[in-house]
Image (tube, grey):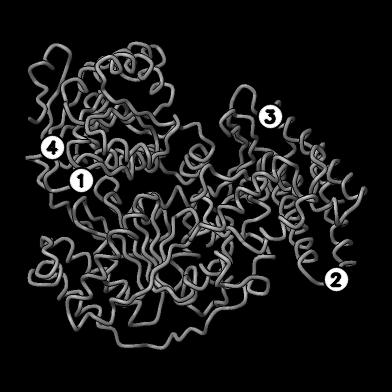
Amino acid sequence: MIGLNEEGSPPVDTGPKPTRVRELVRDVFSETGQLCSALQLEHRPEQAQMARAVAAAMINDEALLFEAGTGVGKSLAYLLPGIIHAVDQGRQLIVSTHTISLQEQIEQKDLPICRKVFKTSPDLGRYADFRSAVLVGKSNYLCPTRLGHALADRSTLFADADYDELQRIAQWAETTTTGLRHDLRPPPRPEVWDAVNADSSACSRKHCDATKCFYQGARVRIRSAQVIIVNHALLFALINSGGAKSHGATTETRGVLFPDDFVVLDEAHTVPDVATNNFGLSLSSYGVDRALKYLFNPRTKRGIFRKLGGPSAQQLVIDALDASKLFFDFIGDKLLTPRSIVRVRDTGVAEPMLEGPLGALHRLMGNLADKMEDGREHDEMLEQQQRIKGLQAELNEWLTLGDKGHVYWAERSGRKQTIISLRSAPIDVAPELRKHLFGCRTSVVCTSATLAMGGSIEPLAARIGAEGAQAVAVKSPFDFERNMRVYVASDIPLPSPKEARLALDALTDYIRFCTDKVSGGTLVLFTSYSDMRAVAMELEPQWRKVHRPFLMQGADLSRTELTHQMRSLGNAVLFGTDSFWTGVDVPGTALSQVIITRLPFDPPTHPITEAKCEHIRDGGGNPFNELTMPDALIKFRQGIGRLIRSKTDRGIITILDSRVLAKAYGREFLGSLPTEAYERLDRKNRENVFRPFP
């Protein structure tokens, strides 16, 4: 994990201090304020309203849920008051986002704007020197100390091929300024990176110089930063591992990650899902294999037991590897054939084949550590012993379904579906968030363009344990009536197994027609990988003939790279599924149309969804109304929100799911559009009705 305060935290002064945040926010965001007069930005009343609400929540250490439509400028509306409050109070502002693109926007665009604002007035000058840092997981950093030990112990730890990779990392270490894994191309092999990254007791202030160690240097920057940028997944992983209390805070100290911090969660519509995924267990055959082979790899004859353990220790690892293969093969054959994901409802689905071998390893490592002198090798032996203990605990919890409030399942994962993963997640994440986020006596601001479900933010508040929070929604300042046209196809067969082929043919035909009519870029959003691939197989050859750029999720490029390609190409067609419904930002004609192929209902068969539905039914509720519809509406609104990203943008929304017309609930989807007007299409009238912008 991150462990930024292993040796204790600096003292926190929680006494009251005066703050000018209300007064300064009022001035900065006024029609004659610095944003307008000095930076020549347009005055946005909605942005000013949000900034005032955020400032009040921060001053009073309260929770706030604020829906800010596209174009409100929500980043500045929380950053400027947050920085002022952080500097005035000597506290840390944690800003958490879901997507890398928003993290990069905040770091590279929004924070520099904040500095410019602060430099425009003597009243604001003291805030211009605020310090910021990006928080990433400890295992992402190279540790030069561990790299030096790995190079010295190469005959013990690495085979020849691995040593070549180690040499490549060592050469990169001489030039990198960050030491971050994602800056090394191609990415390092995991088994080699495990031996040199900072996620080890060997990387500590005792062993490493902060002026030379990338991670220890990052710790210093984090400890002194007033603004810390993090992503939701790491935020909830850190909260789950103890949060502020693991950094020296007490039950009387306010704070979520660090003592006396306060938090903004942008893209907060993703919080329920991300928190759910990070408050459960995740144990894979691949992870167990890596942990054991770090001790000793029978194929290469390398590992720490080559030097420290001897033949008996090596044999125990071999026994554990054999037991692991038997165990995960059994899970795969019994549960995951032919389905790739299966919920586990009862104990006893498999024998605890790994319990004995892992227990023997754990005891041996304790004995070995007892005989060793204090130092790096002793610390590493104890650390690896704890790692084995952690594997034992997770396996035992999964086999015994140890937490009655969790749902348990097994799934195949990895590119070739060869990794067996054992998973669990809380059925209701609200109690965890109520305790570890909103119950930390500090301000927590949640914002997004889509927090409301059916026009109300209260359902989301209940799902994340923020029932007492103030809830506010302001609309986008953009002129959607003038700049957005919405078309709904009425003649596509309703989704059903019997009509599946006809529906897919109709989707293909409409996607061809709509993309041919629009000269700019088109984003086509699917809910099914198989549908996406089938349509791509039909249409890609036709677009290739006319030199129309085609991009698709799941090929060689990441989402960030695909989005960059779409921006630069100008007229590309991009096919995407789940993650492309949110966070994609392509302004201008490079995105002139968004096609919604299906309403984004989550599959009811996923173990988490299934368990949540059962939980709602047991409480006398209606799962469709309380879970399925709200989730689909938020995702639908996010997908629609990809189109208009600036005041001058204009374009077309094309909905290829006739359920919005045929079903009673369709009115909810049409009502969530940012414009009231829409036109029906069918294959007879579409040539006359479908009118792209010139």
Q: Which residue is drawn at 63% across and 59% down?
A: 199
Are discs 2 and 3 less than 8 Å apart at CB?
A: no
Marks 2 and 3, Cα distance to the nearest angstrom? 43 Å
Are discs 3 and 4 less than 8 Å apart at CB?
A: no
Q: Is residue 61 shown above or below 135? A: below
The percent coordinates of residue 263 (x first, y second) are 39, 67
> What residue does disc 4 label?
484
Instruction: Tell me which amino acid carries mark 3.
Output: Gly
> What residue does disc 1 label?
645
Q: Nearer the viewer, residue 652 or 467?
A: 652
The percent coordinates of residue 463 (x first, y second) are 41, 53
Are discs 3 and 1 less than 8 Å apart at CB?
A: no
Marks 3 and 1, Cα distance to the nearest angstrom? 45 Å
Q: Is residue 363 shown above or below 289? A: below
**Circle 3 Cα neighbour tier, 10 Å, few/some/many (<14 / 14–19 / ≥20):** many
> What residue does disc 3 label?
332
Tell me which label, 2 or 3, sits earlier in the chain. Answer: 3
